[in-house]
Image (cartoon, rainbow, N blue to C red):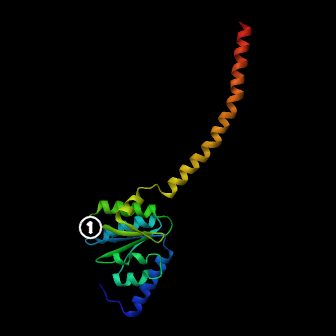
């Protein structure tokens, strides 16, 4: 690993700070023992969920979170640290991270943060079990479509029953 000079460290901290400022969700994890190819697999899964994972020195991460809602994560920056950040909704990245942690024992979630509140590893796991934004929108759309459909069925039942009654009267008169 190459040593960074002071200007490079400042640039890294500034870039990380911008990333944390834009993020809606962050997870701190330990990646000790993972191969680069395995970490690339996680990067790909996170990119599909509008998220990313970054590896940096703990001191740089502590400096980067200052002044952001993720300042509480500083205590989790120990050992080999990777930070995953999500930019839209937290469920997709949480699902990707927990699935990856289940597949690779070398990857473990330490903590997370959502809307300025700290999350434990169990909280991140619980978050991953929630339906995604797309699933919720699909359910909402299904519910919204069901209301007018049911209303139309109720309204059409009245003339339909009248028609059945008239047909029954006609058959009775014919006999």
Image quarter hosting the N terminus: bottom left
Task: Note whether 38 is above or below 162 in the view shown.
Answer: below
In depth, the one of 158 and 82 nearer the eye is 158
Q: Quadrant of residue 48?
A: bottom left
Q: Quadrant of residue 46?
A: bottom left
Question: Residue placed farthest to the top in the image?
Answer: 175
Which residue carries the number 1 mark?
Answer: 106
Describe residue 40's horizontal placement relative to residue 23 as left or right: left
Q: Residue at x 35, y 59 (%)?
A: 99
Image quarter hosting the C terminus: top right
Task: Note whether 16 is above or below 136 in the view shown.
Answer: below
Q: Quadrant of residue 148?
A: top right
Q: Is residue 57 visible?
A: no
In this figure, what is the number of numbered marks?
1
For label 1, the SS is loop
Q: Position of residue 97 (x, y in %)?
A: 37, 64
Task: Note whether 172 is above or below 94 in the view shown.
Answer: above
Q: Position of residue 26 (x, y in %)?
A: 42, 71
Q: Position of residue 50 (x, y in %)?
A: 48, 67
């Amino acid at each position: 690993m190459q040593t960074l000079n002071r200007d490079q460290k400042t640039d890294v901290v500034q870039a990380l700070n911008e990333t944390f400022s834009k993020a809606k969700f962050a997870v701190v994890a330990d990646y000790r023992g993972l191969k680069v190819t395995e970490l690339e697999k996680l990067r790909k899964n996170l990119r599909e969920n509008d998220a990313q994972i970054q590896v940096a020195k703990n001191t740089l991460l502590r400096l980067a979170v200052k002044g952001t809602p993720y300042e509480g994560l500083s205590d989790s920056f120990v050992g080999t640290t990777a930070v995953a950040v999500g930019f839209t909704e937290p469920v997709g990245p949480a699902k990707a991270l927990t699935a990856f942690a289940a597949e690779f024992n070398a990857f473990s979630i330490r903590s997370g943060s959502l809307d300025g509140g700290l999350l434990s590893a169990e909280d991140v796991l619980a978050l991953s079990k929630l339906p995604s934004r797309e699933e919720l929108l699909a359910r909402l759309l299904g519910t919204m479509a069901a209301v007018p459909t049911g209303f139309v069925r109720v309204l059409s039942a009245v003339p339909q029953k009248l028609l059945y009654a008239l047909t029954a009267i006609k058959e009775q008169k014919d006999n």
